[in-house]
Image (cartoon, helix red, strand yellow):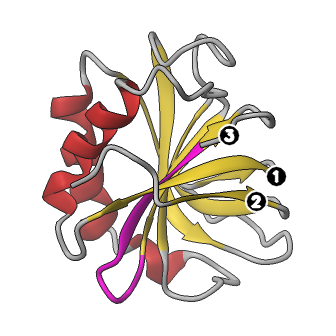
Amino acid sequence: MSTHPTDHFDQRDPLLVIGIELRTSNDEAGRTIPDHWRRFSQQQVPASVPQRLGEDVIAVYTHFEHEGIDNGGRYSLVIGCPVHGRPEVPPGMVSVRVAPSRRVRFPVEKGRPDLVGAAWQRVWQRDDLRKTYLADYERYGPDGGIELCIGVEPGDAF
């Protein structure tokens, strides 16, 4: 799989996601994130999300301890579904807003969520991208498609 993004895009509208939150760090991620995904599945979170926009599942990395600087320290991972409007957030869930921004898209082999961690490693090694460290997300489509959408500074060219 290439370490280069397939394209860049301007996310023009905010993305609102309702789901379950985990506070973790890169040191703990190998242990805590798989458990968080299991919880998402066991609790059948998508069935409880009001006003869903389609069938995508979104995993948002946000609220970085070193926001705007790097991904060191603690951050939040919210796994959920995109919604429209401002629905009431069910008990035990949170909402997170991903602001409009410039992004690069890194594909992951279709149907291979086991390759997402390796894709993130390649993204972190890309020192040519001026990452914003505000909110990044993984999009999982109902067809098995997976992509990482990374926030970058507005002037970045690829």
Question: In the picture, residue 124 is in which quadrant?
Answer: top left
Q: Does residue 119 sit above or below 74 in this rendering?
A: below
The quadrant of the rendering that contains the C terminus is: top right
Q: Which residues are magenta?
A: 141-150
Question: Quick check: marks 3 and 2 in contact, CB under 8 Å?
Answer: no
Report the mark closest to the observer, 1 or 3. Answer: 3
User: How would you rate the neighbour count of disc 3 (Cα within 10 Å): few for under 14, some for 14-19, many for 20 or more?
Assistant: few
In this picture, residue 30 sits left or right of residue 65:
left
Mark 1 or mark 2, earlier in chain? 2
Mark 3 or mark 2, earlier in chain? 2
Question: What x and y, as percent, mark residue 28?
Answer: 24, 21
The span from disc 1 to disc 3 (Cα, nearest Å) is 18 Å
Question: Quick check: marks 1 and 2 in contact, CB under 8 Å?
Answer: yes
Which residue is under mark 1?
100
Amino acid at dot 2 = Gln
Which residue is under mark 3?
157
In this picture, residue 153 sits left or right of residue 45:
right
The span from disc 3 to disc 2 (Cα, nearest Å) is 16 Å
User: How would you rate the neighbour count of disc 1 (Cα within 10 Å): few for under 14, some for 14-19, many for 20 or more?
Assistant: few
Question: What x and y, as percent, mark residue 18?
Answer: 61, 62
Question: Which numbered dot is residue 11?
Answer: 2
Any magenta on residue 158? no
Mark 1 or mark 3, earlier in chain? 1
The total number of labels drawn is: 3
**Element type at marker 1?**
loop
The quadrant of the rendering that contains the N terminus is: bottom left
